[in-house]
């Protein structure tokens, strides 16, 4: 019998390493999405991911004898809606852009977290956050410069960039709701609402436009569900123990993992402009989280 409480205690003791593991598992999730044929609709992938995650989470909730519906249901539902929209956008970007570039754009969300955390959960907004936004956007513009993209033989539609950025914003908002909910809710209740809301909202669309996956696609789909669940679990535990803005910096490791998978498995090209742009986005993330010490 799996001792869930003992595992959770061990995970909590890992502190910041929880977020390193989360980044790694989320990068494996993106790898699975990238390997699935485009004939399978994105909302169907999100639905399958949600179904697998919900089954696993309900098993854990049952084992721990947790009241499944939580205390702050409106915020839990909002977290689920934001997570669903973010995931649809992220899957779309992964499918329609190089993995390395889509991951960098997605990871502008730590800068947005710093802003939203200040607005919604009273984490201090400092002047360096606005400076971080400028640096982060400069990095994105360098990466998406037409000359830069032509050098690596890549064409990206504006709609793909817009959807990727929308996914980043929704991810940031979802992170902030998780941080707020972590004060009053069990982590597995928070995790449960994400796939539950996804399942309810996407099921009618999937049934109307159903496409039956083959066995190879089904293996990748199971991978999406498994790796997302692992990533979400480590992420939620990590966010519970760290400030939202500090935690987001560590999660930028997924850019490194995503770039490695893109180079090794999809023959994606990375040049000096990409490295410069990605470094500026990372620098913006770091600056947005640095506390200004006033001298008296």
Image: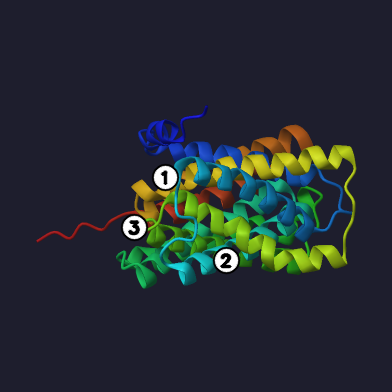
Instruction: Determine which of the numbered discs, if any, sits on residue 128 in the image.
Output: none
Tell me the quarter of the picture where residue 250 sits: top left
Question: Marks 2 and 3: in contact by CB < 8 Å?
Answer: no
Query: How many angstroms separate mark 2 from mark 1 (CA)?
Result: 19 Å
At 58% from the left and 61% from the top, the residue drawn is: 83
Residue 122's place in the image compared with 256, above or below, is below
Farthest residue, direction top? 1
Task: Give the foreground label among 3 and 1.
Answer: 3
Residue 29's place in the image compared with 144, above or below, is above
Q: Which residue is mark 2?
A: 82
Residue 85's place in the image compared with 242, above or below, is below
Numbered disc 1: secondary structure = helix
Q: Which residue is mark 3?
A: 183
Between 62 and 145, the residue placed more toward the observer is 62
Q: Where is residue 204 drawn, in percent x and y? A: 78, 68
Query: How many angstroms separate mark 3 from mark 2 (CA)?
Result: 19 Å
Q: Is residue 106 visible?
A: yes
Tell me the quarter of the picture where residue 132 sits: bottom left
First reached walking from the N terminus: tag 2 or tag 1 = 2
């Amino acid at each position: 019998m799996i001792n869930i409480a003992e595992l959770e205690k061990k995970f909590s003791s890992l502190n910041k390493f929880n977020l390193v593991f989360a980044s790694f598992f989320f990068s494996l999730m993106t790898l699975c999405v990238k390997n699935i044929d485009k004939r399978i609709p994105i909302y169907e992938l999100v639905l399958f991911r949600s179904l697998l995650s919900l089954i696993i989470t309900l098993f854990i909730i049952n084992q721990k004898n947790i009241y499944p519906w939580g205390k702050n249901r409106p915020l839990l539902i909002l977290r689920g809606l934001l997570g669903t929209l973010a995931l649809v956008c992220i899957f779309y970007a992964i499918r329609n852009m190089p993995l390395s570039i889509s991951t960098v754009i997605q990871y502008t969300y730590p800068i947005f977290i710093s802003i939203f955390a200040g607005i919604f959960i009273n984490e201090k907004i400092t002047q360096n956050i606005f400076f971080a936004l400028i640096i982060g956007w400069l990095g994105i513009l360098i990466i998406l410069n037409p000359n830069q993209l032509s050098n690596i033989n890549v064409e990206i539609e504006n709609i793909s960039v817009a959807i990727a950025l929308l996914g980043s914003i929704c991810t940031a908002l979802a992170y902030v709701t998780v941080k707020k909910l972590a004060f009053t809710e069990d982590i597995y209740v928070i995790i449960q609402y994400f796939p539950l809301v996804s399942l309810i909202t996407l099921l009618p669309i999937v049934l109307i436009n159903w496409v039956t996956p083959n066995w190879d696609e089904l293996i990748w789909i199971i991978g999406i569900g498994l790796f997302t669940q692992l990533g979400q679990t480590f992420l939620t535990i990590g966010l519970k123990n760290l400030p939202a803005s500090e935690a987001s910096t560590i999660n930028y490791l997924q850019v490194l993992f995503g770039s490695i998978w893109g180079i090794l498995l999809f023959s994606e090209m990375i040049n000096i402009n990409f490295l410069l742009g990605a470094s500026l986005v990372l620098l913006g993330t770091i600056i947005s989280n640095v506390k200004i010490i006033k001298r008296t």
